[in-house]
Image (cartoon, helix red, strand yellow):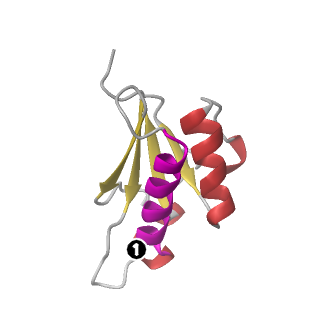
Amino acid sequence: MSYYQRHLFVCLNQRANGEACCADHDAQAAFDHCKSRVKQLGLAAKGGVRVNKAGCLDRCAGGPVAVVYPEAVWYSWVDQGDLDEIVESHLRDGQVVERLVLPDSVGR
């Protein structure tokens, strides 16, 4: 068994050259919200969930992006309600939020 059941990696990359990046979509606030929500739900412990900062995940065109492991499910979101749904449905309950899954065709 892994120390954590799931990891959520949230891209916080900032590009100085004007290219699309997740930081342009307030990814830091999303990270902070997810981390707080996971803690509020009592999931932030051994056997639970870890929310991690990530550099570029190379799927900038779909930004903001995050990925949940071990399932390797990629997400994009619009608002805090979407983030709550990812945390509660996927991270807590193990149910992928299909409407927020980033299509495989979206890359950099």
* Front residue (pair 8, 104): 8
| Quadrant in which the N terminus is drawn | top left
Return the residue found at the far right. Answer: 99
Is 33 colored magenta in this rendering? yes
Magenta segment range? 26-42
* Residue 15 located left or right of residue 97: left
Q: What's the residue at 35%, 54% (across, down)? A: 57
Please state the total of marks drawn on the protein image: 1
Q: What's the residue at 65%, 39% (across, down)? A: 89
Q: Residues within 10 Å of mark 1 (few under 14, many from 20)?
A: many
Q: Position of residue 107 (x, y in %)?
A: 46, 55
* Residue 86 located left or right of residue 50: right
Q: Is residue 16 above or below residue 66?
A: below
Q: Is residue 28 above or below residue 88?
A: below
Q: What's the residue at 63%, 53% (across, down)? A: 84
* Front residue (pair 8, 93): 93
Q: Position of residue 56 (x, y in %)?
A: 31, 60
* Front residue (pair 95, 3): 3
Say what amino acid the circle numbered 1 marks. Answer: Ala
Q: Is residue 7 above or below residue 66?
A: above
| Quadrant in which the C terminus is drawn | bottom left
Magenta segment's dominant SS is: helix
Return the residue found at the far top. Answer: 1
Q: Is residue 98 above or below residue 14?
A: above
Q: What's the residue at 68%, 60% (across, down)? A: 81
Residue 40 visible in the displayed image = yes
Q: In this figure, which residue is indicated by the disc labeled 1?
A: 23
Quarter of image, res 10: bottom left
Is 51 colored magenta in this rendering? no
